[in-house]
């Protein structure tokens, strides 16, 4: 089979399997998959910023929160339709991202991380303290997107959102802009010599990733039906980092793989409570030190080994390029 | 009118400490202007200041009469100035060809034109054509230098700032690098060359400045320098 046909065949197969999933599993598991997809968007978009552009922001979860709260508050107080609310959330996140980027992106590495972390905590505290408006820790009820809490339609909604997000991120990474961002990451001075306005491109990456987070956060808010400042805690950011590192930092499909894997694992180990975070932390340290290619690297290596054992499978297994 | 004029410029990395004390120099169109001097004289600082990495604390820098003091590097690049820094400005994980394309696409997005520029870069640097599909990390020091020069040339600069092109290269490669600079000048590109290799700089430059501790100590056309080369080299080495 020519590579394109093989790709299409694989995509159709994967799509069929993903579409069929909620019919085969319980509502609870459908819910877990929806949350996984939500994290796929967050992880992939954070990887665009931190992995490809090299800007290690610790406020990615905050932009999801900004998207969710903007939409919920607008629909509660102004009665705007949900989609308009989500759109507004995205615009607010983009504006805030632009402002925060302008302030922080001249800082290097650790200072950028600290500044964005401080911003994230400030926003969380603001949401918690302004309870007359946000209801703080009591939680803010949101309108349900499909008017029902039954997860199946949300699963398809998130499946669509995730596919579109991944496609857009793929396009960005493999375009001229993606090359600029990676050039800036690898050697900012050389990128400047090349004639790049590095600050402008870093800020663009910051805004783009904030937009993805706000889209995911906005829709997720109208699925869960209740917002609280808790997911704006650092734990949530840590989860995103864990997913990206475990899946494969700076790879395209690694973060998506890591998001689904970690979310499923996290659900399986729910009985362990907060000990899970310790386990994940150890996992991240081990992967980062010993096997930076992550789960994706593991899958690629396994695929190659399988191909050697069963040569007949080779044309099926080598459809992907190593960088994917 | 000179292409580039630097007038009484003082500059440095922190406020209040001037690495360049008071530099005045002119770069005439179509020429190679050499700036020589001992280590720590401020030669690299001069190029960084012209290219906008540093803002002059005092003084004026003009390109074709237009003041460029306050411009950022990407704006200066758009005016047709290219800067080849001392270390290689290439991306080791990309192939030779990708490096050249990256250089070209920042300025121009016209694919046919980019292809044409790449072709002429390969004609000028045949070694790069042989290794076009190889990652830049596999290049030797001389090839990497050629690539960083070629990468700037594909953006069609009219003024090239070159910092220590021969640093760390084998003598045979050094000859090739300077031959390239001469052929670039033949194509009408003006060059400001900063160099510690006084012999080579004097050989290729039309006009020279010798700077020391951030100030111009001596200037003149090549023949003035050729005559006193021995004395100059000795002074530079001893830092007198």
Image (cartoon, coloured by chain):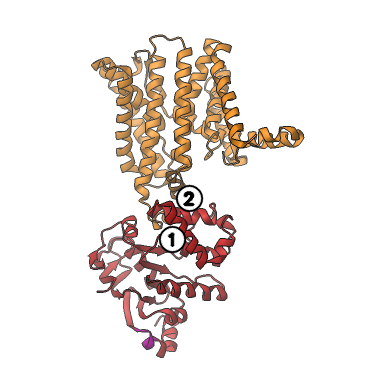
Chain colours: A orange, B red
Which chain does the numbered disc 2 sit on?
A: A
Which chain does the numbered disc 1 sit on?
A: B
What residue is rendered at 49% in x and 33% in y?
A241
As drawn, is A255 to the left or to the right of B153? right
What residue is rendered at 56% in x and 38% in y?
A324
What residue is rendered at 31% in x and 43% in y?
A102
Give, as a single range, the part of the protein colored magenta. B221-225
Of residues B38 and A250, the one drawn nearer to the viewer in this rendering: A250
Q: Is residue A299 above or below residue A195?
A: above
Q: Secondary structure at mark 2?
A: helix
Tell me where residue A188 appears, x and y as whole percent.
Answer: 42, 52
Q: Which mark is residue A186?
A: 2
Q: Is residue A35 above or below residue A116?
A: above
Of residues A154 and B57, the one drawn nearer to the viewer in this rendering: A154
User: Counting other residues with Cα less than 10 Å from the Cα at mark 1, is it few (<14), some (14-19), or many (20 or more)?
Assistant: many
- Residue B238 forms part of the magenta stretch: no
Q: Secondary structure at mark 1?
A: loop
Q: Which residue is mark 1?
A: B154
Quarter location, residue A226 = top left
Quarter location, residue A1 = top right
């Amino acid at each position: 089979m020519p590579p394109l046909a093989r790709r299409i065949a694989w995509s159709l197969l994967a799509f069929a399997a993903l579409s069929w999933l909620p019919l085969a599993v319980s509502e609870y598991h459908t819910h877990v998959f929806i949350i996984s997809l939500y994290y796929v968007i967050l992880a992939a978009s954070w990887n665009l910023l931190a992995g490809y552009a090299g800007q290690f922001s610790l406020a990615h979860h905050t932009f999801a929160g900004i998207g969710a709260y903007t939409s919920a508050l607008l629909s509660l107080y102004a009665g705007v339709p949900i989609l308009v609310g989500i759109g507004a959330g995205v615009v607010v996140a983009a504006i805030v991202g632009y402002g925060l980027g302008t302030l922080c992106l001249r800082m290097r590495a650790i200072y950028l991380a600290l500044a964005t972390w401080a911003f994230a905590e400030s926003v969380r505290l603001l949401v918690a303290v302004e309870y007359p408006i946000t209801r703080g820790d009591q939680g803010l009820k949101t309108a349900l997107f499909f008017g029902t809490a039954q997860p199946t339609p949300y699963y398809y909604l998130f499946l669509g959102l995730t596919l579109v997000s991944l496609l857009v991120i793929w396009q960005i990474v493999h375009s001229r802009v993606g090359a600029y961002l990676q050039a800036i990451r690898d050697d900012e001075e050389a990128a400047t010599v090349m004639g790049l306005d590095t600050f402008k491109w870093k800020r663009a990456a910051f805004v783009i990733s904030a937009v993805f987070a706000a889209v995911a956060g906005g829709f997720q808010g109208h699925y869960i039906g209740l917002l609280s400042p808790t997911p704006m805690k650092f734990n949530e950011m840590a989860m995103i980092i864990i997913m990206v590192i475990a899946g494969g930092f700076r790879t395209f499909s690694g973060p998506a793989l890591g998001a689904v894997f970690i979310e499923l694992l996290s659900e399986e180990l729910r009985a362990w409570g907060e000990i899970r975070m310790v386990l994940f932390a150890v996992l991240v340290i081990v992967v980062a030190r010993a096997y930076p290619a992550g789960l994706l690297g593991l899958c690629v290596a396994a695929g190659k080994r399988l191909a050697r054992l069963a040569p007949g499978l080779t044309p099926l297994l080598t459809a992907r390029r190593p960088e994917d | 009118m000179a292409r580039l004029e630097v007038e009484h410029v003082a500059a440095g990395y922190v406020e209040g400490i001037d690495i360049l004390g008071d530099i005045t120099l002119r770069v005439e169109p179509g020429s190679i202007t050499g700036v020589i001097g001992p280590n720590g004289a401020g030669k690299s600082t001069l190029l960084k200041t012209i290219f906008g990495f540093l803002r002059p604390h005092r003084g004026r820098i003009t390109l074709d009469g237009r003041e460029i003091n306050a411009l950022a590097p990407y704006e200066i690049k758009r005016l047709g100035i290219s800067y080849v820094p001392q270390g290689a400005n290439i991306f080791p994980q990309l192939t030779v060809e990708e490096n050249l394309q990256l250089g070209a696409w920042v300025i121009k997005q016209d694919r046919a034109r980019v292809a044409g520029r790449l072709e002429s870069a390969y004609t000028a640097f045949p070694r790069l054509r042989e290794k076009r599909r190889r990652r830049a990390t596999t290049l030797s020091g001389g090839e990497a230098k050629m690539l960083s020069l070629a990468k700037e040339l594909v953006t069609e600069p009219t003024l090239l700032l070159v910092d220590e092109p021969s640093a760390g290269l084998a003598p045979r490669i050094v000859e090739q690098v300077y031959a390239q600079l001469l052929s670039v000048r033949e194509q009408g590109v003006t060059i400001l060359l900063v160099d510690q290799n006084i012999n080579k700089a004097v050989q290729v430059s039309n006009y020279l400045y010798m700077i020391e501790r951030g100030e111009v100590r001596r200037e003149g056309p090549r023949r003035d320098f050729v005559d006193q080369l021995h004395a100059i080299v000795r002074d530079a080495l001893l830092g007198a």
